[in-house]
């Protein structure tokens, strides 16, 4: 939706935006991958520190 606001001219005019050039689009795309890279590094760190545990099965406790 955010890209649509920049690309779709009638909406861009409402927000007084100008079109991005190729360099600006490249920066935008590269910056958008930063959170993905951070999360992948975090997952590898957690895997190293805690071992690869995705879900731990919990035992049910029956009380009578």
Image (cartoon, grey):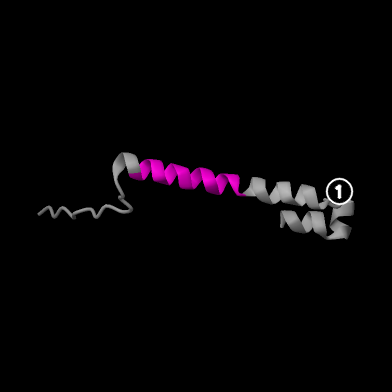
Which quadrant of the view contains residue 31?
Answer: top right
The span picked out in magenta is 33-47
Residue 4 screen position, x and y as percent: 77, 59
Side of 46 where 32 appears, left or right: right
- The extreme top residue here reads 49
Element on which disc 1 rests = loop
Residue pictured at 49% horizontal, 45% vertical: 39
Residue pictured at 64% horizontal, 48% vertical: 32
Which quadrant of the view contains residue 51?
Answer: top left
Side of 4 where 34 appears, left or right: left
Tell me if residue 38 comes above or below residue 7 in the rendering: above
> Where, quadrant-wise, is the N terminus in this rendering?
bottom right
Residue 43 screen position, x and y as percent: 42, 46
Residue 21 screen position, x and y as percent: 83, 51
Q: Does residue 36 show up magenta in the picture?
A: yes
Is the residue marked by circle 1 packed among few (<14), some (14-19), or many (20+) residues within 10 Å? few
Side of 46 where 56 appears, left or right: left
Residue closer to the observer: 63 or 2: 2
Which quadrant of the view contains residue 12?
Answer: bottom right
Q: Does residue 32 show up magenta in the picture?
A: no
In the rendered picture of this protein, how many numbered marks are placed on residues?
1
Residue pictured at 35% horizontal, 45% vertical: 47
Residue closer to the observer: 19 or 12: 19
Side of 64 where 40 appears, left or right: right
Residue 23 screen position, x and y as percent: 78, 48
> Where, quadrant-wise, is the C terminus in this rendering?
bottom left
Q: Main secondary structure of the magenta part?
A: helix
Q: Which residue is mark 1?
A: 17
């Amino acid at each position: 939706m955010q890209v649509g606001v920049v690309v779709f001219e009638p909406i861009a005019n409402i927000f007084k935006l100008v079109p991005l050039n190729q360099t600006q689009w490249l920066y935008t795309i590269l910056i958008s991958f930063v959170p993905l890279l951070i999360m992948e590094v975090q997952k590898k760190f957690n895997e190293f520190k805690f071992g690869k545990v995705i879900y731990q099965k919990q035992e049910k406790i029956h009380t009578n």
